[in-house]
């Protein structure tokens, strides 16, 4: 083993088969970050149904994801992200933070509004909650359609952004946070809510998700759609009846 390289192991929630990657946007977020960093790391999936000994030994009282960095255990997703960005730094590793602070928060409320809508047990509230959810999607799309300053510097006459991702043409920490959640939204909306994500009129969001689907670091870290649907079955199944 190269002693100059850290020993990194990411523990992720396992799927229903007990071995492959399960539905957990926080796990996928860290998976994507490590991949984009270009670090050497291993993945260990944790079957939560069997109350594995690894949790008791390494992270008692914690749920995946958690990270083993050399002999140090880290269990908070946000702090793990900060640690990796600070520790796996240039020139050996890629820098993933955003250039524009607005990119960090773009789309933050989409998953919140989606969850409120899909989990709503009171039909009379559905219309209002759906409107709030769709408005959040439109706000995200508007951000993606709005040219960033670097685009305007290249062409002051640019009226609509053509960038690939939230902060530019490279995936960042913000994308690693948002894309796993948008994948859940897309899968659940199609199956249980009869809503196509992205709506075709939202050009920025359509471009964003199309580009994301071409990125191996995203599409190859997604759980199977069946895992997502199983996770939402108990709260959303009544919508298909």
Image (cartoon, rainbow, N blue to C red):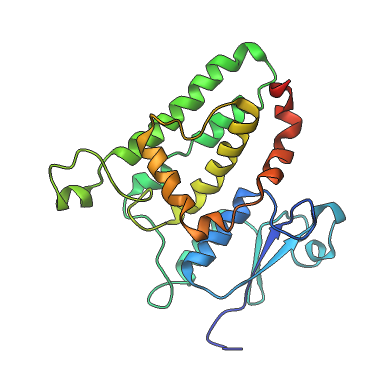
Q: Nearer the viewer, residue 170 or 81?
A: 170
- Left-right relation of 165 to 110: left
State the image quarter where residue 186 is shown. top right
State the image quarter where residue 140 is shown. top left
Q: Nearer the viewer, residue 171 or 224?
A: 224
- Left-right relation of 45 to 78: right
Which image quarter is the N terminus in? Answer: bottom right
Point out residue 134 in the picture as x, y percentages from the top left corner. 47, 26
Point out residue 234 in the picture as x, y percentages from the top left corner. 76, 31
Q: Nearer the viewer, residue 216 or 5?
A: 216
The mark tally for this picture is: 0
Point out residue 232 in the picture as x, y percentages from the top left corner. 70, 35
Can residue 74 be seen? no
Q: Nearer the viewer, residue 108 or 56?
A: 108
Image point (57%, 37%), residue name: 185
Can residue 82 be seen? yes
Image point (73%, 22%), residue name: 238
Image point (80%, 67%), residue name: 57
Which image quarter is the C terminus in? Answer: top right
Point out residue 141 in the picture as x, y percentages from the top left corner. 38, 35
When the figure is inspected, residue 51 is found, relative to residue 125, above or below; the finding is: below
């Amino acid at each position: 083993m190269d002693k100059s390289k850290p020993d990194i192991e990411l523990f992720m929630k396992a799927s229903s088969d007990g071995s492959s990657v399960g539905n957990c946007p926080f796990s996928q977020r860290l998976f994507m970050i490590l991949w984009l960093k270009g670090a050497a790391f291993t993945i260990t999936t944790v079957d939560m149904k069997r109350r594995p000994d690894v949790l008791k030994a390494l992270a008692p009282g914690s749920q995946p994801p958690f990270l083993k960095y050399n002999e140090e255990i880290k269990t908070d997703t946000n702090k793990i992200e900060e640690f990796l960005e600070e520790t796996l730094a240039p020139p050996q590793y890629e820098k993933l933070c955003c250039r524009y602070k607005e990119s960090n928060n773009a789309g933050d409320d989409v998953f919140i509004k989606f969850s409120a809508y899909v989990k709503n047990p009171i039909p009379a509230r559905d219309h209002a909650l759906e409107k709030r959810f769709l408005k959040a999607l439109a706000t995200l799309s508007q951000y993606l359609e709005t040219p960033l300053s670097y685009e305007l510097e290249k062409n002051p006459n640019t009226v609509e952004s053509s960038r690939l991702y939230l902060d530019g043409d490279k995936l960042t920490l913000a994308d690693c946070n948002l894309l796993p959640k948008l994948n859940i939204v897309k899968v659940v909306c199609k199956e249980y809510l009869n809503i196509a994500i992205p709506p075709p009129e939202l050009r920025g969001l359509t471009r964003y998700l199309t580009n994301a689907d071409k990125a191996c670091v995203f599409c190859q870290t997604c759980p199977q759609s069946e895992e997502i649907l199983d996770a939402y079955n108990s709260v959303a199944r009544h919508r298909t009846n």
